[in-house]
Amino acid sequence: MVNIRRAVRSDSESLERLYTQLEKDAVYYQPEHFIMSGKGARISDGLFESDTQAVYVAEVGGEVVGFVHILLMESKNIACLKREKNVYIQDMVVDEKYRSKGTGTLLMGAVKQYGRDHGASFVRTQVFPKNEDGLRFYRRNGFAETMITIECPLD
């Protein structure tokens, strides 16, 4: 059975292990933008006691097998933008052995509840265009494209 709970400082080692998987994916999908970071560079002190961000972990038999790091954000102060809050998924990963078993969906439930509890209107994130499994997961959880990010290298 999967237990979803708020992360605590003693989860840091498990989070580091999972961040390694996440970074490997990022380097695979966009090596022009991502590198592997060093151990200890991934977990900040404020991560566990913040009013504007949270980390939830998925635990199976006492082992942390996934996490989601979320930020509570407000729209920019621009005249044409509606003033509203959103939850931004900064990072999310489920250990490869536990994927496609509903663990990510349970984490997403915690994200959505956090948003409702904090007066957010929607949840937003980014996913690599070639990450078909990630795209399928987010679509199954109610996400749809609302904007496309494009960039131009200056080489």
Image: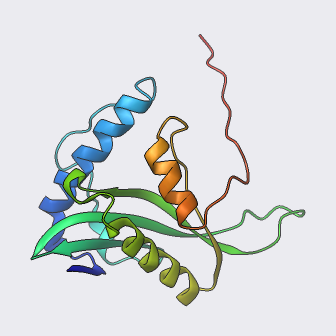
Q: Residue at x 78, y 74 (%)?
A: 83
Residue furthest to the left in view is 62
Residue furthest to the right in view is 80
Q: Name the image quarter holding the C terminus.
A: top right
Q: Residue at x 22, y 45 (%)?
A: 20
Query: Dividing the picture into quarters, in which one does residue 36 lie?
Result: top left
Report whether 128 appears left or right of 55.
Answer: right
Q: Can residue 15 be seen?
A: yes
Picture coordinates of residue 91 (x, y %)? Answer: 40, 56
Picture coordinates of residue 28 (x, y %)? Answer: 36, 30
Report whether 81 appears left or right of 74.
Answer: right
Report whether 53 appears left or right of 18.
Answer: right
Residue furthest to the bottom in view is 117
Q: Residue at x 35, y 69 (%)?
A: 102
Q: Is residue 113 above or below residue 69?
A: below
Report whether 66 appears left or right of 124.
Answer: left
Total label count? 0
Residue furthest to the front in view is 101
Colour basis: rainbow
Q: Residue at x 21, y 60 (%)?
A: 15
Q: Can residue 34 be seen?
A: no
Q: Name the image quarter holding the N terminus.
A: bottom left
